Amino acid sequence: MRLLVLGRSGQVARELARVADDGHEIRLVGRDEADLSQPEAAAEVVRGLLREFPAQAIINAAAWTAVDAAEAQEAEALAVNGTSPALLARIAADAGLPFVHISTDYVFDGAGETPFSPDAPTAPLGAYGRTKREGEIGVAQAANPAGWAVLRTSWVFSAHGANFVKTMLRLGAERDTLRVVADQIGGPTPADAIARACVRIAETLAAEPAMGGIHHFSGAPDASWADFAREIMARAGLPCRIEDIPSADYPTPAPRPLNSRLDCRSTEEAFRLARPDWRDGLDRVLTNLGARV
Ligand code: NDP
């Protein structure tokens, strides 16, 4: 499939670049080409690119992901996460192309202990979640007859960029003990699995546009950050002890949802995409980084 992908150096974007190995033709669009903080200008660039590159679907893997910085820069984050995705979704609809957009567990307030279903009420706790929710609404409102999907995921990790796995490997090599939050529960999700899911969804929408809508995709089993950290240390052979702490002991500018569990059944039913086991993804990442024992 010929795929136009917004994002180039991000975790998911880099993994999307690698699906070219599976016979797909991928055109990645970085911030230097289309800056989503300037929605109208970026939209013009994307319209031009579609004239050169006859894409069969558009995947938006670009986002303002600096969760805490968004608290002080919500307008800028909104341009990237809200206004631009709405415009991109409209471009895809006008061009008759399926549109796949990635969103987040942070659209929920994290109350309770049961997994959130795709149609559960949203109530973001912070600016990042609010801007991502605006993006979801914009994508849905474009009502793309060629098909649209919002794939909410959580706790993304990969061998690239800044993420929890890489932070734990660095700190675990320096310290004997680390205090890690144990009362936030969610599904760590390997970026390579998200990339493959986006492609599968684009292919499915191209054949059956009505399969779209909002869907969830996160790694299994659900775990706490502390559980995740322990698994990282064990698989990397680092003798660092993980001490459980409550979120209250690790204050951040943007509050985090305590319950990030996502009910992913609709994704499995619509797209035959089962929740990926994050421990397998962790092994792949550690092997890539030369850190697996
Ligand atoms: P990264 O932070 O690794 O990458 C962000 C990407 O967005 C980069 O490719 C970057 O572009 C691009 N980008 C940022 N600002 C702009 C801008 N102004 N104009 C154009 N492009 C921009 O993100 P992830 O790969 O981790 O996230 C992918 C998706 O998953 C996002 O939608 C995110 O909201 C969502 N998500 C992420 C989670 C996480 O834990 N990271 C959790 C849940 C959902 P460039 O390549 O040019 O630098």
Image (tube, rainbow, N blue to C red):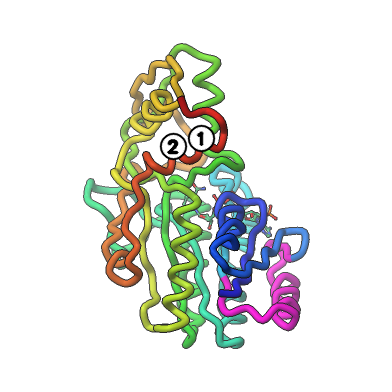
Q: Is residue 67 left or right of residue 244?
A: right
What element does badge 2 sit on? helix
Residue 277 place in picture, x, y as percent: 34, 46
Image: 251 above or below 22: above
Number of numbered callouts drawn? 2
Q: Is residue 55 magenta?
A: yes
Q: Is residue 270 above or below residue 145?
A: above
**Rendered residue at 56%/54% (across/down):** 15
Q: Is the residue marked 1 within 8 Å of ligand 1, measured from its CB? A: no
Image height check: is 253 above or below 203?
Answer: above
15 displayed left or right of 267: right
Residue span colored magenta: 34-58
How many C-alpha atoms fall within 10 Å of the one at disc 1: few (<14), some, or many (≥20)?
Answer: some
Image point 45% across, 47% down: which residue?
A: 190
Evaluate if marks 1 and 2 touch, with contact meaning CB atoms under 8 Å apart.
yes
The quarter in which the N terminus is drawn is bottom right
Q: Position of residue 148 (x, y in %)?
A: 46, 77
Specify whether 172 is left or right of 33.
left
216 relative to 290 in the view: left or right: left
Q: Position of residue 180 (x, y in %)?
A: 40, 26
Q: Name which residue lies at 60% across and 71% down.
A: 3
Q: Residues within 10 Å of mark 2 (few under 14, many from 20)?
A: some
Q: Amino acid at mark 2?
A: Asp
* Residue 280 figure quarter: top left
Please state the horizontal and vertical placement of residue 256, each as a whole percent of the image.
Answer: 42, 42
The residue tagged 1 is 287
Give the labeled residue for mark 2.
Answer: 283
* Amino acid found under the numbered disc labelled 1: Thr
State yes or no: residue 71 in magenta. no
Q: From the viewer's side, name the closer residue of 48 and 28.
A: 28
